[in-house]
Image (cartoon, coloured by chain):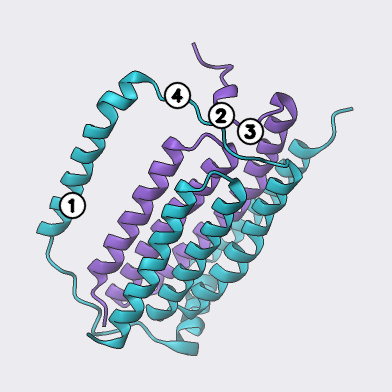
Amino acid sequence: MVPTSYYLVLSAILFGLGVVGFVFKRNVITIFMAIELMLNAVNLAFVAFSQSFGKLDGQVFVLFVIVVAAAEAAVGLGIIILIARQRQSLNVERVDLLKL
Amino acid sequence: MSPQLIIFFLLAALAVAGALSLILARHPIRSALSLIVVMVALAGLYLLLGAEFVAAVQIIVYAGAIMVLFIFVIMLLNAGEEERTNLSRIATMAGLPLAVALGGFIAAAIARAPLLPPSSAAAPFGAASTKSLATLLFRDFVFPFELTSFLILVAILGALVLAQRES
């Protein structure tokens, strides 16, 4: 059997890589994908804990996270299409209306 | 080394390689395909953890529906190579040491933590696991479950309003 800690370390690594991608990427769509990566990392931790404690509540949580991620993807991609239409670019540096 | 451990390390390496490739790829389509690799590897890990239903949902909803939506938008907007921009000077000077320090703190905390043993009681496996998951979802969590349908309805309306053509 695989120790639960291994899953948690993998989850932490994936989450960290997601944060790195979120901070460093310049393309809106890629940033959005980095967010999905972070959600997936958290899901892995949920399922690992669910198995570790022998309770299924963690898996129910994962289902809810997936539903919310699907809703988020639909709305977020709609926003991205709007940004691309108005700015003619997918670069986040061009979306700086609120920047001082 | 038990076969489970070998499979775990293979899938973990695949997931980390996919995540790295997501960050390093310059073209959004390559990032999207890397993310699909990560999701499939995670589905394999869920199978290893005895969560069959979650693994199936991961493949169908995440790798299937959400990523198709992503790739559809990438192609619709004809997203090309990412343009490089200069990082600010503060970010280059302070960012790297701080990131290394944070990573070191987290690694030290993980190294000091006791190794959580795998569950001996073990959650119910196979079809029984899916059955008890359904019982839990439709009995104890029925109110949140109904709320998600409302959430999805709102998301559909939001996406429609956002994406409609301006008159």
Tag 4: amino acid: Asn
Between the C-alphas of marks 4 and 2, the distance is 13 Å
> Which residue is rendered at x = 20% and y = 48% of the image?
B106
- Disc 4 on helix, strand or loop? loop
Mark positioned earlier in the residue sequence (4 or 1): 4
User: Does residue A57 appear anywhere in the picture?
Assistant: yes
Chain A tint as drawn: purple
What is the residue that sits farthest to the right in this orientation? B167
Q: Horizontal placement of A3 versus A59: left or right?
A: left
Could you tell me residue B8's position as x and y percent?
A: 34, 75
Between the C-alphas of marks 3 and 2, the distance is 6 Å
Tag 2: amino acid: Val
Between the C-alphas of marks 3 and 1, the distance is 35 Å
Q: Classify A86 as above or below B147.
A: above
Q: Foreground: B109 or B90?
A: B90
- Disc 1: host chain: B
Q: Which chain is cyan?
A: B
Q: Nearer the viewer, mark 3 or mark 1?
A: 3
- Residue tagged 1: B107
- Residue tagged 4: B86
Could you tell me residue A3's position as x and y percent?
A: 23, 74
Could you tell me residue B157's position as x and y percent?
A: 74, 44
Q: Are marks 4 and 1 in contact (CB under 8 Å)?
A: no
> Which residue is rendered at x = 71% and y = 37% of the image?
A81
Marking on residue A26: none
Q: Nearer the viewer, mark 4 or mark 3?
A: 4
- Residue tagged 2: A92
- Residue tagged 3: A90
Tag 1: amino acid: Ala
Between the C-alphas of marks 4 and 3, the distance is 17 Å
